[in-house]
């Protein structure tokens, strides 16, 4: 099965809106509209090999869902954070920033959406972002350059770091604590989050403005992200693996460019350069890795490979296997239940407790 991806990315000038301050504490967290399929193609596995839980913690995602409405949050939309080039043309990259209306500077969480390296809709997962913001964090959801603009992973990592530098440069304006920053990504965003945290202090990925500011992060939350791209489909059936590894696939296009005939299977130096494990060292940020054992798009073993790399490099890391969970919110596939495993208080509480330890401890 092949999954088509695509969505319209919102634009517009910065504005501020907030939920009704009288909203009950039991209110459902707000959800963004489901994107319209289109654009690139992502293989969906027919079968998945059993998932190892070695060295990992298992979460059974039962119990109540997250609730919102306890804390008023201001949303600033359409803030341009960088204007890099893509396909030889300047492109404005925007972010949406949620800031809880509480006293004092807020630790910053930069959210990196997924989209198969094909799309990067910053409006995604509004419910989860709002929940995290209500725990007292400024949450910035960013867009970044993708395959559709002829870009590669190096551009994506550079964009994340540009957003962090921009937000640090404007920390006073937005009420942000510039010393305490985490990145949180899902799927392709999980990959970029891991790359960002692994490459703390690596100037090779620093591009654009505000280069006098640091892009170093203090924590990484990586949900069902890819890591070793040459093995991203190793848990899947032969047909899915062949499509994923074929020239021009979403994996190969993000490493080599959309028109390249090269593949990660035959270019070991390129796959090493695109692997966050390559950059792990004493400056790398602590990470948590969350992966569903029923993920049909990114092999669950990817997070175990990354955990082993973290331990070998003596970087703090914990892997959580979410029982029965697929690849996040799959409502655009017609599955309105899959995302609920990722929005339980058990799963989201694992994330916020980690953020509390690393950004408030």
Image (tube, rainbow, N blue to C red):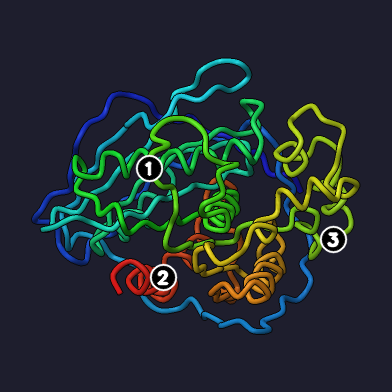
Name the secondary structure under disc 3. Answer: loop
Closer to us: 291 or 343 = 291
Closer to us: 121 or 182 = 182
Tell me the number on the disc at residue 237: 3
Name the secondary structure under disc 1. Answer: loop
Residue 190 horizontal/vertical position (percent): 56, 55
Tell me the CA gap for discs 1 and 2: 36 Å
Q: Which residue is mark 2?
A: 344
Left or right: residue 157 versus residue 181 is: right
**Furthest residue toward top:** 89
Closer to us: 58 or 2 = 58
Tell me the CA gap for discs 1 and 3: 45 Å
Left or right: residue 64 versus residue 263 is: left
Name the secondary structure under disc 2. Answer: loop
Q: Residue at x 47, y 37 (%)?
A: 143
Quarter occupied by the C terminus: bottom left
Q: Is residue 186 visible?
A: no
How many discs appear? 3
Binning the other alpha carbons within 10 Å of mark 1 as few (below 14), some (14 to 19) or many (20 upward) gives some
Choose the circle earlier in sequence order: 1 or 3.
1
Above or below 126: residue 295: below
Asked if the residues shown at circle 1 and circle 3 are in contact, with their CB atoms under 8 angstroms apart, the answer is: no
Tell me the number on the disc at residue 123: none
Tell me the CA gap for discs 2 and 3: 30 Å
Residue 232 horizontal/vertical position (percent): 75, 57
Tell me the number on the disc at residue 213: 1
Above or below 207: residue 265: below
Residue 174 horizontal/vertical position (percent): 21, 43
Choose the circle earlier in sequence order: 2 or 3.
3
Q: Residue at x 50, y 56 (%)?
A: 336
């Amino acid at each position: 099965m092949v999954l088509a991806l695509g969505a319209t990315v919102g634009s517009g000038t910065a504005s501020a809106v907030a939920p009704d301050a009288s909203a009950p504490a039991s209110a459902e967290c707000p959800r963004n509209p489901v994107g319209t399929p289109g654009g690139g193609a992502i293989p969906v596995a027919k079968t998945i090999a059993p998932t190892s839980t070695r060295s990992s913690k298992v979460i059974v995602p039962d119990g109540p869902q997250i609730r919102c409405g306890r804390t008023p949050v201001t949303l600033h939309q359409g803030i341009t954070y960088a204007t890099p080039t893509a396909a030889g043309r300047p492109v404005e990259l925007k972010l949406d920033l949620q800031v809880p209306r509480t006293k004092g500077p807020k630790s910053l969480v930069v959210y990196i959406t997924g989209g198969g390296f094909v799309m990067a809709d910053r409006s995604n997962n509004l419910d989860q972002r709002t929940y995290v913001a209500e725990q007292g964090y400024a949450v910035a959801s960013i867009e970044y350059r993708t395959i559709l603009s002829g870009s590669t992973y190096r551009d994506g990592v550079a964009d994340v770091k540009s957003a962090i530098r921009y937000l640090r440069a404007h920390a006073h304006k937005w009420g942000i604590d510039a010393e305490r920053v985490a990145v949180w990504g899902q799927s392709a965003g999980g990959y970029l989050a891991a790359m960002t945290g692994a490459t703390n202090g690596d100037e090779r990925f620093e591009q654009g403005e505000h280069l006098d500011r640091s892009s170093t992060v203090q924590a990484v939350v990586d949900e069902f992200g890819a890591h070793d791209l040459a093995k991203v489909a190793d848990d899947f059936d032969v047909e899915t693996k062949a499509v994923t590894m074929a020239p021009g696939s979403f994996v190969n296009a993000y490493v080599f460019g959309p028109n390249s005939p090269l593949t990660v299977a035959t270019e070991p130096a390129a796959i090493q350069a695109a692997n966050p494990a390559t950059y792990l060292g004493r400056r790398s940020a602590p990470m948590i890795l969350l992966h569903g054992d029923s993920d049909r798009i990114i092999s669950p073993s990817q997070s175990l490979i990354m955990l082993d790399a973290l331990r070998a490099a003596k970087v703090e890391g914990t892997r959580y296997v979410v029982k029965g969970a697929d690849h996040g919110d799959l409502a655009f596939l017609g599955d309105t239940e899959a995302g609920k495993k990722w929005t339980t208080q058990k799963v989201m509480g694992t994330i916020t407790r980690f953020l509390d330890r690393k950004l408030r401890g």
